[in-house]
Structures are given as structure tokens and as C-alpha cells.
Image (cartoon, helix red, strand yellow):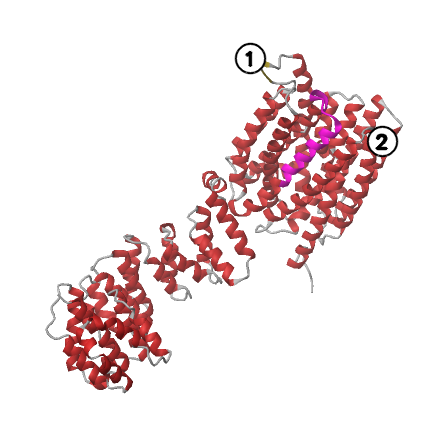
Amino acid sequence: MVRTKYLSEEEKKIGQAHLYRSEAWNGLGVSMLGDTIVYILAVRFGAGNIALGYIASAMYIVGIILPMTSRIFRNRNVVRLQTINWLLRGFISLLYLLLLWVEGTFAVSLLLFVYTMFCTFRLLGMVSYDYTFKSITTSRNRGRVIGNANVAFQAVTIIARFVNFIVTSLQSLSGIVGMVGLQMFGVVANTFASYHVSKIPCRTTIEYKKGRTMVVLFREAMADRNSRTRLLVYWIYITVTVVLGMTVAFLTKEVGLSSSLVFLYATGVSLAVVLSGSFCKFFSDRLGSRPLIIANGFALVISIVGWIVVPVTAQPYLFFILGLLTNFFLGVINILIRRLISAVIPDDEGVGFNSMVNFVIAFFALFGGLAGGALATVGLRITHELHIGTFNLGNSYILTHSLALALAMTGLVLSVLLREKGSYSTKDAAQIMFSLHGIRAFLDMDRLNKATDPIKRKSLLLSLGTNLTGVATGEIRSTLASPFSDDKGEVIRGLFDRPRPSLADDLIKDAFDTDSYTQIESIFALGSLTHNEKVEKALVYLLEHGTNLSRSTAAKSLARVTRDSRYLTRVESISDLAVNTTEEMNFLVARNIMDKEGSFFEELFLAAKKGMSATFRQTRYSVLAHFLEFTPPLAELYEQKNLGREDYLADFIEEARDVVEIDQQRIAIISAFEHREWSRIWAICFSMTRNLTFRNTRMLHLYRAVQEAQTMPRAQTDGDDALAALYFCYHLKKNCD
């Protein structure tokens, strides 16, 4: 079979599995080879703020080499290119070993050179990675896979950085030797990461089209409003990331934390990013990226203000809390904006597009890194502390963090302009995220997707049905829109118990669809939307059209919606159409609600006259007794009779002895039922109910039905009718005036 460059579902699953493994090893490698150790080493070798600012931006500055990427690597397999670059970044890191023999300015220069090359190969790999990531995901699971990959990366990073903390806490390993040793361990982990990258299925090659330069791609992206807004937000928040990357240098150089505490801080940062990945995995695919970016952008602005005012003399835990919050909010934003960017990457020019994106980032990062470093130096020379009583506020990085604040506010404003199909509004998303009911709805939906046990699924559907949040309503609406779902009928029935007026149109649409297998359930559920004019009109139409079952169900629901007798005459005229028990019960319920006087009770023995089945008649008699709230329930007597209990009448006769006629003829009644002498039962009933009067109209109509039955041929009746006659006559005698 000829295969396209697009992967099958099975290949995508394999790719995702290797992606997660590569991210886990990558988290270990980057923790040892990334910027934290480089910052600490740079400070130890006497690097200035500009050099430290360069380190913060080096990962992105190297994007200036990307214009030639598509041309140089054209027709190369995307994953193979990424694998080679992953191997090369580990190989170049072996040069860190030279730091064991050099010092001062030369050591700083060597450090910056090796780290620049490391970032270069890493960026070349990332250009391929973004497109690879798109090829092994779909729009439905992209948020979840991004979140899983992020969690895999950051979870291992937490462990690795905690190991760094332990190692640097040891006196003998806290110096240059210990840190370089950690870097060599990172080289090994990086090699394992490249192995798993190489196993990701890929049939895509880098395409280069003559004349399709970065300038052309940039102009096209900027001409499209959707792409332009997403890219601008992405570039600005990357710049914020670069500037805030200076916090490690701030803690090392200005606050004076030990290397072990800096690694512990970095561990907390990784934990924050893990939490941000879990947050995105849980919320993003359902709520959308836009509302979450806006909400977290606002929170990020507040947390950056904390960095501006915190004094260098503050307790270390305050810096840890600020770092945790800032990196969580920034992590959520970066993950979600990458999700939006992935959606606009062109299929045919993915690498070229990514190269253009990262090329522009290089200039933003260069500005952010150098400006952040320069402002840190300027901050030392100006008044940067504010004394209020015994409180000291501010620090020498006030200008650096103010730059981050200005950029974050710009990103927040632009985020409002983002467009994303199907995403929630910011207000609705906030109500869900900061509401226990909203969180519970998400948990129920997540569990429902995984549950296979029918009982557990019904329990979760019940919980979701009682949850009146917008997200629960949205999930139910999606189920209603499905032509087939195992849960659809259950969900619709749940809407009768927990009405949602906002879903009236959805139910009406399904109720009008004669080919929907849940049409009857939808007509039934409409009955819960009382005094709803739109629903009433729909049910009036359904009362006149469709099958007997749909018309009878519409009659029942119409009665519940209107709660009056406006449509009683029409329902009475079509109730004779009932040919089965379900239809008969529907019409009876409708008439019971509409007809407050209960004239339909005069038709007590209508089913016997029509010669309906025993089940039909038993059900009808039991329903009518239920309407009158008689006890014991007539259904229980039929239940005992149907089970073949010889003494099924014993308990009832015992209770009915408060009526003189039954008490006096108790033995005769039992004997008549044993010998199937139904005429004797009827005679006892007529004698017992002679000359009774009633003020209750329902009881009066029931009495008329019994009187009329005196002329009914006994051949039309059997033991079920005789039992009903005895039961109703007992209650008539008991409740007469």
C-alpha cells in the first residue's frame, strides 16, 4: 500500500510513546547541561551582567542562523535531522571538561562559546521538533500530548535538579569539579534522548521552495490576522521568559544564595512547570487556549510585581514562592501559545515556517537578554530601595523586572485579540476553573472518558447531570449532537430530573427527528421545561404528527409543561389511539395532569370492554389507583397474584375489614377467588357501593364507572377485573361522605 507522509493512528501512538521517553531523558540532560549550571559557573568565573543576560537569551539568539536551514537541509528527513542535532549538542558539551584547567576571562569565554553551540544545535533540533510534534498529534489531543510531554520532561527535571542540589550540598563536590561532572552525566542522558527521538515514525522531509524565503513567510504570516496575533503573543512571552531567566543570576549574584539553594530553587521552578503542564492537559482541550492565556497572563503580571518589590534581604522561601508562581503562570502561557502556533504551521513548509518564527525570536531574545543585563547594571547605580517604617522594598533588579512587567502587560493586551474556534470566554473559563462545581464537572468528564463499567458510567452521568455549570452543559450538548452514543439516552433522561432551559433547542431538534433513536426520550425530557412557550409550541406540533407513541409522549410532556386543561379536549379525542401499554400510560398521565376533576376515571373498565390483555389491564388499573394514592398499592396485589401466591389476597382482606361488608363476607370473597366465581365478586361490589355520595369529583367519577359496570357482560371480565372491582369498591365505600 502506498503511504503518504501523514502518519496512521498506530504510528502516531508509537511516536507519542517515544516522544514521552525522549522528553524524560531530555529533562535529565537539559537539567545538567542547561542554563542553571552555566549561570553558577559564569558567576564563579566573574562574568558581568551583560554576559549573564546573554546566557538568558542564548537559546533564542542563535535563531539568526536559521534563514539557511531549509536550503541546507532540504530533502532531509525531519526526525533524522533532529536526532543528529541532539547528538551534536551532547558532543559539543564535552568541551566543558576544559573548565577544569582554565580560569577567569578565558573560562567565561569558553563557557559562553560551548553554551552557544549547545543552544545552536538544540534550536536546530527544536525547529524539526515542532513539526514532528504536529505530525504525531491531532487537534483533538494536541493539548493533552503537549501537557504529557511537558510533564514527562519537567518531572524528570525535578529529580535531576534535586540530585544537583544534593551533589552541590556536599563540600567536596560543590566546586567546579562537581558541576562539570554533572554536565558529563547530562551528556550521557542526552544520548539516550536522541535514541528515542530517532524511533519516532516520520516520512516528512524538509522542503525548500525557491523564492519562499523567510521574508516571504514572515509577510504572509503578518498578513493573516490569526497567525499574526498568535506569533506576536508568542514572541513577547518568549522575551518575558528570557528576561525572567535573569532571576537565577539575581539569586546567585545579588541575593547571594549558595549553589545548592539555587539548584533547590530550580527544582521548585521545574515543579511549577510540571504543574502547568498538568493544568494544561486537564483544561486546554476543553476550554481552549485563549481564556487560559488571558487568565494566566493577568496572574503573571501580578507575580512579576512581587519580584520588583521583594528586597534582597527577604527570606529564601519568599523567592521560592515567587519563582513557583511566576514560572507556573508563564509555563501555562508558553505551553498554550505553542498549542495555538502548532495549529497554524503549514503542512508543506513546516520547517521553513518554524525557522522564520525562531529567527524573529532571536531578535526579541537579543533585546531581552542584553537589555535585562544592562538594566541590572543600571539598577545598581540608582535608588532602588524604598523604606516604609521597618519594611524595605525593592532591589537592584528593579529595572530588569520592570521590563518583564511591561512586556507581560503588552502580551496580556494582545492576548485579548486572539481568536480560537470553540474556546470558552474568559469569564466562563474563570467560573469553571475557580468553582468547585466546575472542577467537579471536569473530573467527571475525565473519568467518564476512561470508565467502562456500566454502573460507574451511570453514576458519573448522574453526577454530571446534576452539575449545572456551563462546561457540564457543553458536554451534554455534545452528547445530544451525536447520532449515536452509549450514554445519549441516559443523558437525555437525566435532563428530565435536572432541567436545562439552555438545551431546549437541542432537545426540540432531536424530538422532531423521526429517525433519531432517542426521539421519545427527548420528547419526554421536554416535559421538564414548564411554562416554556417554545417547548409548548413544539409539543403541540408533535401531538398532531408522528407515531402513536410519539404523540402520546408529547401529550404527557405537554401536560407537564402547561399544567392546565387547554389541550385536554384534544388529548381525550386521540387517547383511544393507544394500542399498547406505554401509549395508554402516557395518555393517562397527560389526562391526570390536565383533568383536575378526573372525568377519565369513568373509563375505569374501558380496557376490559376492549378485550385488552391481562398485562394491559393490570397496568391500567394500577396506574389509576396510583393517581388516587390508594393503599396498599394495587400493583402489589397483582405482583403477588402473578407470582402464583395462593394467599395473595390475605393481607388485603385483613386490612379491608374496616369496611363492614368485607368483614362480614370475608370468607365468601376468598372462596369466590379460589373457585373463580367472578360474578359473586361483582355482586358483592355492587351491593357494597349502593347509594353512596361523594363531594370529591374524582371519587364521584370512579363511582359512576362502577355503577355503569353493572350492565357490562361478565364474559368480558376475568379475575384481574374482579380484583380491581373489589379494590376500588373498597376504597369507594371507605371514602364516601
> Which residues make up the magenta segment?
252-274
Please give the label number shown on residue 304: none
Q: Is residue 124 left or right of residue 588?
A: right
Q: Is residue 164 left or right of residue 433?
A: right
Q: Secondary structure at mark 1?
A: loop
Q: Quadrant of the N terminus?
A: bottom right
Question: Residue visible at 51% across and 52% down?
Answer: 445
Q: Which of the two residues, 101 or 457, is positioned nearer the viewer here?
A: 457
In primary-sequence order, the first of circles 2 and 1 is: 2
What separation in Å lies between label 2 and label 1 (alpha carbons)?
Answer: 46 Å
Which residue in the protein does label 1 denote?
389
Displayed quadrant of residue 376: top right
Q: Is residue 541 left or right of residue 274?
A: left
Report x, y in % for residue 37. 76, 31
The amino acid on which the numbered mark 2 sits, given as a three-letter code, is Val
Mark 2 vs 1: CB contact within 8 A: no
Report x, y in % for residue 350. 66, 45
Which residue in the protein does label 2 denote?
177
The amino acid on which the numbered mark 1 sits, given as a three-letter code, is Gly
Between label 2 and label 1, give the one nearer the viewer: 1
Residue 577 can be seen in this image: no
Question: Residue visible at 26% across and 69% down?
Answer: 625
Q: Quadrant of the C terminus?
A: bottom left
Q: Please, which residue is most extreme toward the right here?
A: 101
Q: Which of the two residues, 516 or 646, is positioned nearer the viewer here?
A: 646
Q: Secondary structure at mark 2?
A: helix
- Asked if the magenta segment contains residue 255, the reply would be yes
Q: Which of the two residues, 228 or 692, is positioned nearer the viewer here?
A: 692
Relative to 135, residue 59 above or below = above
Q: Which of the two residues, 687 or 393, is positioned nearer the viewer here?
A: 687
